[in-house]
Amino acid sequence: MPHDSTTTATPSAPARRGLPLLLGANLAANLGDGIAKVAFPLLAATVTRDPVLIAGLSAAQFLPWLLLAVLAGALLDRIDRRKAIVLANTARAAAIGGMTVLVLTDSASIWLIYVGALVVGVAEVVADSAANVLIPSVVDSNGLSGANSKLQATEIVGQTFAGGPLGSLTFAVFAAFPFLLTSASFAIGAALLLALAGSFRPQRSSSEMQDRPTATLRSDLADGLRWLVRDPIMWRLVVAAGGLALTSELAQAQLVLYALEDLSLTEAAFGVFGLVGGLGGLAGAAVASRLVDRFRGRYVLAWSMAAAGAAFVAMGLSAQPVVSAVLFGVFAGAVVVANVLLATTRHRLVPAELLGRVLGVWRTVVWGMLPVGALLGGLLTTLLGSTSATFAFSGACQIALGVVTIAAVLLLDRRAGRRHNPA
């Protein structure tokens, strides 16, 4: 991918010192996310084993991205991004606290679980988007791939490596325990960023101020969408990322049923299964920045898709928990490499004052595919009769997506060669 350091302002020395605080806050918040994303489906599984209702929970968790990501992105180009994270994490801590009360009083129905997941998801849209667009404010352009790898690592450590096992083990002790820990994690994430000094409200460019001195939220949204559509690289990446999200979520939404039913794991072992996936994700984060900086980005993306798909196909054919866990780690590592590439390219190409809006449109498309994929995955499992078959189908779709991407890359390279070397 091309490098363009002119689109991102060089951060000041105090701002650079904010990266450890941002990463620490992100680690704490993602620990809460990881615990919640295990505790919510385990709690739902005590109420129902209907694959469609289980998939509906995953859809409820990601639905806010489909509905609110664009609006959140536009707001993040107008307000202080640090304060947005603090408020969102505080809201998540309060909402999970309410869920704790419901679990303690044995009042949690599947529909109330959905409501809790929706509320937490709304705050997650703001917090995660703000953390992403803060990255160019705390590192210079040469450190973007490394910072994005570290951000991915905090998500993996928090959500999968620590949060998953902790969520399942504490749920096995008593059901309210993981929700108490989740609420505390979000509160810590909010507190850490209170120590980050300075203003992180984006400054609009002089040309934008001249064109629209009193720009409305609607016009801001239109500017972000117009820029994305006109950029030949970014809109293609949105399509590729959306396809990967849709095809992978077909199976990921069924992971709890795959582990409990097809692999016959216990609820506590389900978290350990996710732990192995976290190790794979950390390995991906460790090599991602070097791959992104050394090789052509389009090839890295295509091969990451193919590797992720091959791992899911093999999971669908495996009945051994250890083998399946290792394969899930391969999948996680491949997806992390793809995510680092996509985030770094976005930070390098998108103007700083448009980053929130472009990210909002991006995540509406990409993350909006997750609830669609989750619901289709539930229907697919019902139709095929097993979650293993769904994993195999999902993996085949990802491999096909990778093959199409590689073919498109080769075609573009061939056309570029003809332009430079006319017959």
Image: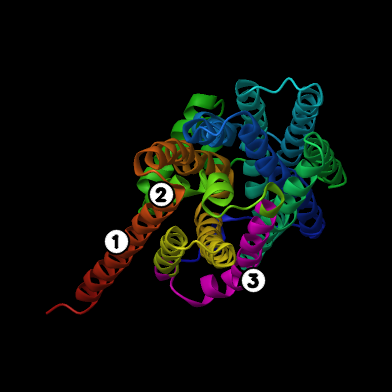
Q: Quadrant of the N terminus?
A: bottom left
Q: Main secondary structure of the magenta part?
A: helix
Question: SS for tag 2?
Answer: helix
Please give left or right for residue 120 compared with residue 336 in the image. Answer: right
**Is residue 187 depicted above or below 152 in this figure?**
above
Q: What amino acid is found at the position of numbered circle 1 in the picture?
A: Val
Q: Quadrant of the C terminus?
A: bottom left
Which label was assigned to residue 286? 3
Labelled pair 1, 3 in contact (Cβ < 8 Å): no
Whether tag 2 and tag 1 are in contact, CB under 8 A, the answer is no
> Residue tagged by mark 2?
390
Up-down: is 208 above or below 291? above
Q: Position of residue 213 (x, y in %)?
A: 56, 29
Q: Quadrant of residue 310?
A: bottom left
Residue 293 shown in magenta:
yes
Residue at horizontal 44 percent and vertical 38 percent from the top: 378
Q: Would you say 66 lies left or right of 138 here?
A: left
Q: Nearer the viewer, residue 273 or 144?
A: 273
Q: Residue at x 19, y 74 (%)?
A: 418
Chain-order first, disc 3 or disc 2: 3
Per the rendering, the mark at residue 334 is none
Between the residue at mark 1 and the residue at mark 3, the CA separation in whole angstroms equals 27 Å
